[in-house]
Image: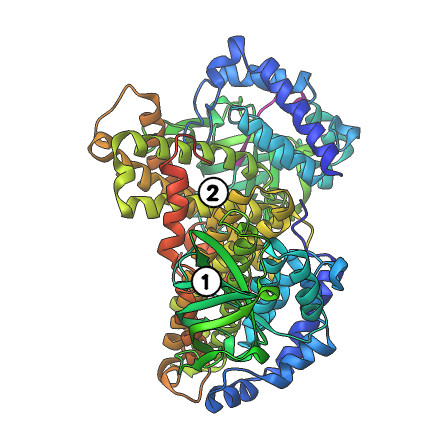
Amino acid sequence: MNLVLSDDQQLIREEASRLLREKASPQNVRRIVEAGTGFDAALWSMIAGELGWCAMAVPEAYGGLGLGLTERLLLVEAVGERLAPVPLWSTTCAAAPLLEAIGSRAARERYLPAIAEGRIAATIAWGRIDASEPLQATGVTSKAVDGGYLLDGHVGQVIDQPAADLLLVSASADGEQALFALEREAGYESRQLETLDGTRPIAELTLNAQFIPDASRVDDGGFDASSASSAIAIAQLGLAAEQIGAARGVMDLTLAYVAERVQFGRTIASFQAVKHRCARLEVDLAEAKALIYGTAAGFPSATPEERLLEASGARALASNLLFRAAEESIQLHGGVGFTWEYDPHLYFKRAQATCTLLGSEEAHLEAIAARLLDKEAAA
Amino acid sequence: MSDEATQQLRAEISQWMADHLCGRFEPLRFRGNAGDGDALPELRKEWERELASGGWTCPGWPGEWGGRALSVAEQVAFQEEYGRAGGPGRMGHIGEGLLGPTLIAFGTQEQKERFLPGIRAGSEFWCQGYSEPSAGSDLANVRTRARRDPETGDWLVHGQKVWTSLAHVSDWIFVLARCEEGTVGRNGLIFLLMPLDQPGIEIRPIRQISGGAEFNSTFFDGARARAEHVVGAPGEGWKIAMALLGFERGISTLGQQMAFAQELELVCQIARENGAAQSSRTRQRIARAWVGLRAMRYLAMRVLAEDTRPEALRERLGYKFHWSNWHRDLGKLAMDVLGADAGIVSDDPRYERLRQLFLYSRADTIYGGSNEIQLNLIAEQGLGMPREPRGNLT
């Protein structure tokens, strides 16, 4: 297993960082936050359309580049570093893998090429977004009717829905789980919510006997947690990668600030109390990053259970790290860290918003504990 | 090397271990690791010769000196399989992993011919003479003196070294000493190779908090290093001493992680047995330990790869802090899982192993650069933050 980035992977990461430094500059991100849209449509059309970032997540058979999971994670990590308001994680790490895992042939042929070409952004109406098995218990039910289905239910928070052209909804029907595609054009009721984190839009979804034609049922006759497990693991790893990207971003803000701020005739970076706190975060970032990219490298040969456990581990580390990195940034910036003008609060809000998304640190650790302690043989 | 070839190597090692770590060597299984380093020294020396006869000492050395020139990936495979099989702590580690590579890089031809075969054969054992009572984290504050004997050109050494692991069962010691009067810090040091069995050397054991004594104080009172046993030039000792530490790239920590995994498994086993696994806080801590160990393995593999980017340097610098604190935390977790049983000496060997872990792991965050020094290094070398000012107290 090679855990060092290849030259090509390195290039992907560097080019993505370079582009986002310019296009997702703090000024641009703040413009989106203050407008309240949570979504930078121009940036999205550039990275998804012109630059083909989504193509990396799609197999060649569906018009993508078929690159590995590592490349996908590098891009969402770069997006996280700048809090770029684009639905890259939802599209490439959530919707595309789910379509690939459980989509019928027709659904894959319809949607994956569109994602690869950057024509659509896609997301999932996760059930309980604070649960670590979020495709279950969406609270949406479906009923077969002539020529299609009627969907009923309410999903409190749909991440990235305001930016998405395609929404995948998991619904239960007579004890079976089904997945439906709601296209923007089809028309359905949603309402964008005001959010703590202004860099990612969230909407509420209300389905009231919403008619979905047969052709829009995505799965091939039902699915269960095990058939969706690799998609869930990718979503978790992607989110963890995005979180450590954000941690890197906010840690770099801190390092730049403490290197310039002078008190008592010296930079505050020269105080050991400050140095050690920055160093601790580096240790923990290295740990999270190693687990994320190690899991990605071993993904093809790992068992579904191993993938989920390691992805849960990655989430537990990344959620914890990002929050601490962000709160330390505010603290080490001192008074200005509390101002709207300085950037740490943007990351602080992202940290809180993501630390419960798809399972809290505690829920992920409990999932691992259950595997280690509640069965006879431990991993 | 292809994954398939590595798999073959793994199978070969694991078979060899199964065939040899048995019979009279059976008692060595899982013994002699950190914290248990003074266990069964004579049998472990015989084990080193057994390993040597199978060609499994010094597998990373070049063929010219009897090694197999294994790549990093292959050495990782070796360490993991060795650890998995319960291979005992290596008496030959200091010679094989530290001094040998240093001689190969900086030694004279005569030094290589004199010393490398003994290390390779498991017939000569080495210990390290670096730390002193006043030179711990501040290693450059070495005060042990080496004076040249004008008649023979040999070096006569006076002073005291401390934490000399296994000196009492070793044959040779390498010593960092001050050879130029009036120098301070990194200048004026010399790197000497000295036999331990000679007049003027006295070794006294240091009893540890775990009760055992794998460390010693080693006193030098006019002990002799021969003129041809200086590595590098007199005055360049610091360079050699640091290069030696650089060879400790952490490959052996992969084997150590196998022992960590067994310790964690013991903790899980006992938690299931005694009901500790019902506590939600304990469950969280055990899961966190599992995550940390998984990450540690990947981190080690990243650290060992030849990667020169700045972020790779940061990861490398953080590795020691990560594993040592993980291990120390596991020691406390193990005791908390044992609960009241932790306080009573037990004849359950699992309990004793965990008690040793609890006590010994306190050393992990101190030796080889304490937590505080590690964080300084990460901040200064990894993040470019200002260096700590030096004081002038002596």
Asked if residue A84 is positioned above or below residue B15 in the image, the reply reads: below
Q: Which residue is mark 2?
A: B131
Residue A142, which numbered label?
A: 1
Residue B320, image x and y in percent?
A: 50, 48
Specify the amino acid type for callout 2.
Answer: Ser
Per the model, the C-alpha gap separating discs 1 and 2 is 72 Å
Residue A318, image x and y in percent?
A: 47, 60
Q: Quadrant of residue B391?
A: bottom left
Q: Is residue A227 left or right of residue B373?
A: right
Asked if residue A107 is positioned above or below residue B83 in the image, the reply reads: below
Residue drawn 58% across the image and 64% down it: A214
- Residue A39 visible to an observer of this rendering: yes
Q: Quadrant of the N terminus of chain B?
A: top right
Residue drawn 76% across the image and 30% down it: B110
Kindly indicate whether the residues beneath marks 1 and 2 are on one polypeptide chain. no
Read off the magenta span. Answer: B118-128
